[in-house]
Image: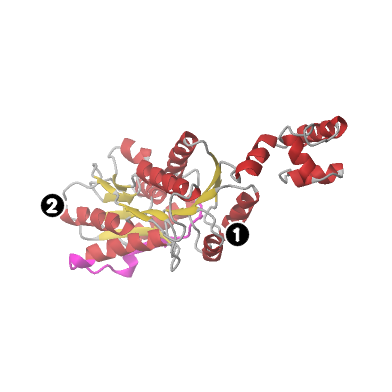
């Protein structure tokens, strides 16, 4: 349903936007607007569900006190918790937050930016999809406040708060290597986004630094948005083709969850038969027996830094032409799924 605007109210009553504005701001008598006209405006505002308080604030200050948060999947552990912290911090500063998910779909992401722009949000926090470059450049050219989180847009200088995906992946792989695992499989998604590219690069470089060549068949990539059932089947098929693997590195937490199910269905025990680590934490990983070793993203720090940076931009406390980038290091949490490897008798 289209959001009702002052222009819609004025058009339906065949009056001016200025008249509607004066009524909204309680200046109808002062400005000589008849009681009959003022009542018609107020009645129609109520009938159409128009929010005059928000409209009046925008007219007075040019600000809606709302922020648009566009992430990949609000139901995901990482993004869901990011949203929770951002909302909390925004409310402390008198702002509301509109949440939406792109499901990694370019068209959805473009539509969300447009819809939020039409709703007069003061700024955006965006997890960019692969094909969003032109829209990001447009926001930048038009001086719209925004901050990118989780991933960068190649060759576009923007304000951002991201994780050091490379070092997190490198350190997680090195943990496996230091514990005696050398035949490590890597499971990820097909993606050219910076976060996933850096995670794969960190894995490959850690293996190379240990003088280990990773065979192409040891890397499995699945399509984002594929059904859980099909991903589990793909992982099971991968395990059959690679019976010598002694450890698995999952590049995202949801792949880790499905991977654990695939291992269970394949009658492989963690860590007796195969060690497991995952990039991104998840409540399930902590509660499972054995618990799962992870490269955890400091969610509260990422969320807090991103909303504070955006608010500084909105309030013009940061120079418009100066971009700010925050790179936050992940934390390797060693649990029971990747102990030191013991030689089998």
Q: Circle 1 — which element?
A: helix
Is 315 in front, or is 270?
Answer: 315
Residue 21 location (% of width, % of height): 74, 40
Does the rendering let one see residue 325? yes
Is 206 situated left or right of 63 in this image? left
Q: In which quarter of the view is residue 53 placed?
A: top right
**In the depicted structure, whether residue 125 falls above or below residue 186:** above
Q: Position of residue 30 (x, y in %)?
A: 77, 33
x, y percentage for residue 12?
A: 84, 43
217 in magenta: yes
Q: Is residue 180 above or below residue 65?
A: below
Asked whether residue 71 appears in the rendered view, the answer is no
Q: Is residue 186 magenta?
A: no
The one of 268 and 193 positioned closer to us in this rendering: 193
**Residue at position x 29%, y 37% in the image:** 289
Residue 295's x, y, as percent? 30, 49
| Element type where label 2 sits in the image | loop
| Horizontal relation, residue 38 to residue 99: left or right | right
Q: Nearer the viewer, residue 16 or 186?
A: 16
What segment carries the magenta color? 208-227
Q: Are marks 1 and 2 in contact (CB under 8 Å)?
A: no
Residue, x 63% and y 43% (percent of image)? Answer: 58
What residue is shown with label 2? Answer: 343
- The residue carrying mark 1 is 107
């Amino acid at each position: 349903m289209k959001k009702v605007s002052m222009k819609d109210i004025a058009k339906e009553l065949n009056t001016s936007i200025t008249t509607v504005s004066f009524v909204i701001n309680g200046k109808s008598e002062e400005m000589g607007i008849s009681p009959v006209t003022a009542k018609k405006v107020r009645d129609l505002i109520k009938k159409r569900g128009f929010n005059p308080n928000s409209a009046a604030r925008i007219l007075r200050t040019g600000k809606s006190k709302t922020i648009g948060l566009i992430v990949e999947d609000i139901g995901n552990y990482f993004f869901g918790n990011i949203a929770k912290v951002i909302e909390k911090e925004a409310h402390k500063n008198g702002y509301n937050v509109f949440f939406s998910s792109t499901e990694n779909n370019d068209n959805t992401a473009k539509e969300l930016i447009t819809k939020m722009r039409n709703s007069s949000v003061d700024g955006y926090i965006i997890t960019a999809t692969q094909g969003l470059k032109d829209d990001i450049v447009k926001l930048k050219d038009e001086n719209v406040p925004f901050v990118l989180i989780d991933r960068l847009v190649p060759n576009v200088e923007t304000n951002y708060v991201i994780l050091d995906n490379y070092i997190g992946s490198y350190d997680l792989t090195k943990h496996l290597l230091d514990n005696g695992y050398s035949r490590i499989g890597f499971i990820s998604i097909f993606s050219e986004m910076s976060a996933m590219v850096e995670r794969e690069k960190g894995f490959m470089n850690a293996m190379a630094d240990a003088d280990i060549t990773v065979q192409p068949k040891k890397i499995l990539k699945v399509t984002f948005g594929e059904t859980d059932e099909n991903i589990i089947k793909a992982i099971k098929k991968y395990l059959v083709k690679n019976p010598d693997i002694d450890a698995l590195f999952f590049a995202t937490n949801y792949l880790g969850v499905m991977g654990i199910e695939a291992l269970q269905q394949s009658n492989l025990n963690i860590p007796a038969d195969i060690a497991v680590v995952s990039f991104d934490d998840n409540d399930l990983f902590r509660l499972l027996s054995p618990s799962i070793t992870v490269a955890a993203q400091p969610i509260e720090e990422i969320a807090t830094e991103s909303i504070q940076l955006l608010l500084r931009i909105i309030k013009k406390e940061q120079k418009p032409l100066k971009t700010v980038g925050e790179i936050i290091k992940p934390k390797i949490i060693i649990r029971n799924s990747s102990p030191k490897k013991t030689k089998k008798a």
